[in-house]
Amino acid sequence: MNALASARGRAHWIALAAAVVLVAGIGVAVWQSRPPRLPTAPPQGSGAAPDTGDRVIEQALGQVQGAQTPVDSVAFKQRWLDEVRGADVGGLDATKLELFLRFANSERCTCGCGYTLAGCKASDMTCEVSGARLEALLDSVRAGRITSARGVRSRPHRGG
């Protein structure tokens, strides 16, 4: 019986050790699955203001193309572009090229970026929305389905 009692005693210790390892494993799993902690705002009176979205955006726009003054994001997104990246305008005469540019610089991209079609393609060559819409516009201009730009934004005059 002593051997049987000794075996039972070891079995209890092994079961206890297995339970401790199991609980520790569950604790580690829970600890690692928790969401990451977000940085906290600096304490009041520390002199450092937290970065707000608007301030970060303003700072980034101020750095666009080495601008000396901050850039208005709406004006930047609606700026006139004389060339549309990725658009093969070869073979278009001056009239058709002007039609294409007026529409590309007037129509807004529907991907949600807030740019014109020309501006979206300039800032994101991978945008499938502006790419497809620009191709359709170019095909329509080439085929003569678009012949007038009445009521569409005109090329801005260059001051001098």
Image (tube, helix red, strand yellow):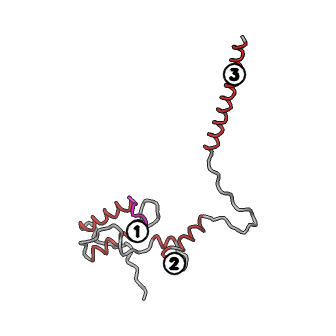
Q: Is residue 138 magenta?
A: no
Q: What element carries label 1?
A: helix
Q: Select label 3 or label 1 by which is in front.
A: 3
Specify the quadrant of the image occupied by residue 102: bottom left
Q: Mark 2 points at which residue?
A: 67
Q: Nearer the viewer, residue 75 or 32?
A: 32
**Mark 1 Cα shell of 10 Å, populated few (<14), some (14-19), many (≥20):** some
* Furthest residue toward top: 1
Q: Select label 3 or label 2 by which is in front.
A: 3
Specify the quadrant of the image occupied by residue 85: bottom left
Which badge, 3 or 2, comes first in the chain's sequence?
Answer: 3
Name the amino acid type tagged 3. Arg
> Considering the image in quadrants, where does the N terminus appear?
top right
Return the x and y of residue 33 as percentages of the image width and height.
60, 43
**Mark 3 Cα shell of 10 Å, populated few (<14), some (14-19), many (≥20):** few
Q: In this view, does 113 lie to the left or right of 3?
A: left
Asked if the residue under mark 1 is in contact with the one under mark 3, i.e. CB atoms within 8 Å, the reply is: no
Q: Is residue 47 left or right of residue 83?
A: right
Q: Name the residue under label 3.
A: 10
Which badge, 3 or 1, comes first in the chain's sequence?
Answer: 3
Numbered range of the magenta stretch: 121-128
Q: Name the residue under label 1.
A: 122
Residue depicted at x 37% and y 72%: 152
